[in-house]
Image: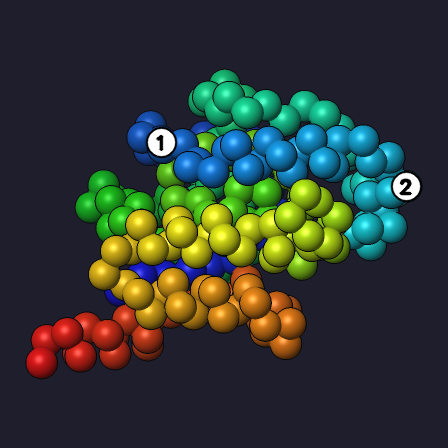
């Protein structure tokens, strides 16, 4: 089965991961485009755009300025050890053994406004940029339009046999009515169905 989960607003930037393995995000060129787009924004701009307090807006403007395309273990952390929240509490990354983590790395993806798709061990830097943000960019007026084609291509190449995943992702991105629900969806049922179909 393949799973797609949302990121989280709260980040853990201090605890030490208990797994030294890491991977790199595959859409960093796109991420850099978004950073270049949002860097000129002032704290007031970000506060208005994302409905944030002045304190959080200032913090995230600083993060955009400090973001670097080159991700290393010195300036980044694996996503699964960085995002916090109910989903990540349930995953409990610190309890996963090597076999569990390998399975997660193959089967789990995190939908990200800045990175597009993240594998659990992909290095990431601190940011706040939700997929629903209406940020004007070179590909449209929001992040769904920015990421649409890239995410479809990446989903099809990552899960080559999981075409239902790609179709669902494309439909979710393209339909205005589903946007608010996109980040929190999980996909076990659709892949269980596909497995049953393929076994016949």
Compared with 70, 112 (above or below) is below
Tag 1's secondary structure?
loop
The picture places residue 158, in percent across and down from the top left corner, at 31, 50
Residue contact at pointers 1 and 2, CB within 8 angstroms: no
Can residue 78 be seen here? The reply is no
Please name which of the two marks, 1 or 2, marks the residue nearer to the observer.
2
Q: Residues within 10 Å of mark 2 (few under 14, many from 20)?
A: some
Given residues 83 and 187, the one toward you in this image is: 187
Tag 2's secondary structure?
helix
The picture places residue 47, in percent across and down from the top left corner, at 85, 47
The quadrant the N terminus occupies is: bottom left
Residue drawn 48% across the image and 48% down it: 150
- Mark 2 or mark 1, which is nearer the start of the sequence? 1
Label annotation for residue 22: 1
Residue drawn 31% across the image and 50% down it: 157
Question: Would residue 133 be found to the left or right of residue 77 on screen?
Answer: right
Task: Name the image colouring.
Answer: rainbow
Residue drawn 69% across the image and 31% down it: 36
Given residues 58 and 99, the one toward you in this image is: 58
Question: Would residue 187 be found to the left or right of residue 59 on screen?
Answer: left
- Write down the residue under mark 2: 44
Compared with 173, 69 (above or below) is above
């Amino acid at each position: 089965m393949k799973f797609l989960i949302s990121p989280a607003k709260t980040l853990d930037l201090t605890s030490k991961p208990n797994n030294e393995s890491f991977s790199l995000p595959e859409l960093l060129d796109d991420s850099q485009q978004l950073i270049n787009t949002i860097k000129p924004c002032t704290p007031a701009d970000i506060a208005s755009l994302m409905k944030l307090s002045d304190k959080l807006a200032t913090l995230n403007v600083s993060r955009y300025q400090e973001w670097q395309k080159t991700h290393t273990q010195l300036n980044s952390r694996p996503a699964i050890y960085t995002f916090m929240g109910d989903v990540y509490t349930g995953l409990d990354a610190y309890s996963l053994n090597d076999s569990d983590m390998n399975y997660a790395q193959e089967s789990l993806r995190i939908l990200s406004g800045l990175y597009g798709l993240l594998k659990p061990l992909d290095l990431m830097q601190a940011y706040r940029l939700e997929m629903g943000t209406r940020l004007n960019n070179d590909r449209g007026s929001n992040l769904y339009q920015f990421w649409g084609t890239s995410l479809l291509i990446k989903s099809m190449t990552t899960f080559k046999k999981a075409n239902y995943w790609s179709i669902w992702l494309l439909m979710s991105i393209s339909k205005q009515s589903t946007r608010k629900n996109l980040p929190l969806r999980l996909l076990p049922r659709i892949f269980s169905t596909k497995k049953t179909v393929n076994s016949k």
